[in-house]
Image (cartoon, grey):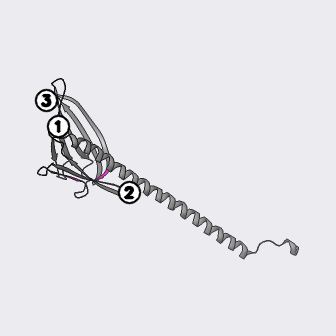
Amino acid sequence: MKLSERGFTLIELLVVIAIMSLITLGATMTTFQVINVTRQSNDHVAAVRQVQNAGYWISRDAQMAENVVVDDDPETAEFLTLTWTEWGYDEDSYYHEVTYSFQDLPAVIGKLERQYVIYNDEGGEEGNKTNLIAEYIDYNPGNTYATYDPPDEPPVLTVQITSSLGEASETKEYRVKHRPDF
């Protein structure tokens, strides 16, 4: 073998392998970090959306409600019941009842459902609809609750909702004033 045809030495090959290993390790760590941050961000956005959706429906129904019943017993599925009467133009009236209840009891994280029932003048059921309002709701006492203070003028329904998904958690409090009487 001629001197001008020398190859790489063992040390040179080891140095190149070490540098390539460091570059690969850095790229792998960066990829896992991006994936982890994306997952955490997605969990937080989902938790926020669940709280907003539950707050929207409860606020909407509470603004129409004439009667509010809060069930603060953590052993029962019912959470909140709202009722009101709608007077029609044709002298008919309809009684509306909306019940919010937790599904998947006795687990800590579950679903919030809305059952909407309409009754006619004679008490006959005109319609019944059940919707899933929110998932990942943390209904530990102190995290998700409702209070109703009728002595206040006007009475105020306060609902705090907490949604937890993975490491993300979002809590929001909604305060809805009673509709004015005409």
Task: Please name whichever residue, 131 or 174, is drawn nearer the observer in this view of the structure.
Answer: 174
Q: Which residue lies furthest to the left in this view?
A: 151
Nearer mark to the viewer, of 1 and 3: 1
Q: Mark 2 points at which residue?
A: 166
User: Is residue 142 left or right of 36 when viewed as pictured?
Assistant: left
Q: Mark 3 points at which residue?
A: 123
Q: Distance between the residues labelled 1 and 3?
A: 14 Å
Secondary structure of the residue carrying tag 3 is loop
Residue at x 43% of width, y 57% of height: 40
> Is 64 included in the stretch rendered in magenta?
no
Residue at x 34% of width, y 57% of height: 169
Q: Which numbered tag is attached to residue 124? A: none
63 in relation to 158, above or below: above
29 in relation to 137, above or below: below
Nearer mark to the viewer, of 1 and 2: 1
Secondary structure of the residue carrying tag 1 is strand
Question: Local crowd at mark 2 within 10 Å, few (<14), some, or many (≥20)?
Answer: few
Residue 57 x/y as whole percent: 28, 43
Answer with mark 3 or mark 2, whichever residue precedes in sequence.
3
Q: Give the range drawn in magenta.
A: 136-153
Q: In which quadrant of the rendered image does the N terminus lie?
A: bottom right
Q: Distance between the residues labelled 1 and 2?
A: 38 Å
> Is 146 included in the stretch rendered in magenta?
yes
Q: Which amino acid does label 1 sit on?
A: Trp
Q: Which amino acid does label 3 sit on?
A: Gly
Residue at x 50% of width, y 57% of height: 35
Q: In which quadrant of the rendered image does the C terminus lie?
A: top left
Residue 89 x/y as whole percent: 19, 25
Question: Local crowd at mark 1 within 10 Å, few (<14), some, or many (≥20)?
Answer: some
Q: Which residue lies furthest to the top in this view?
A: 90
Q: What residue type is labelled 2?
A: Gly
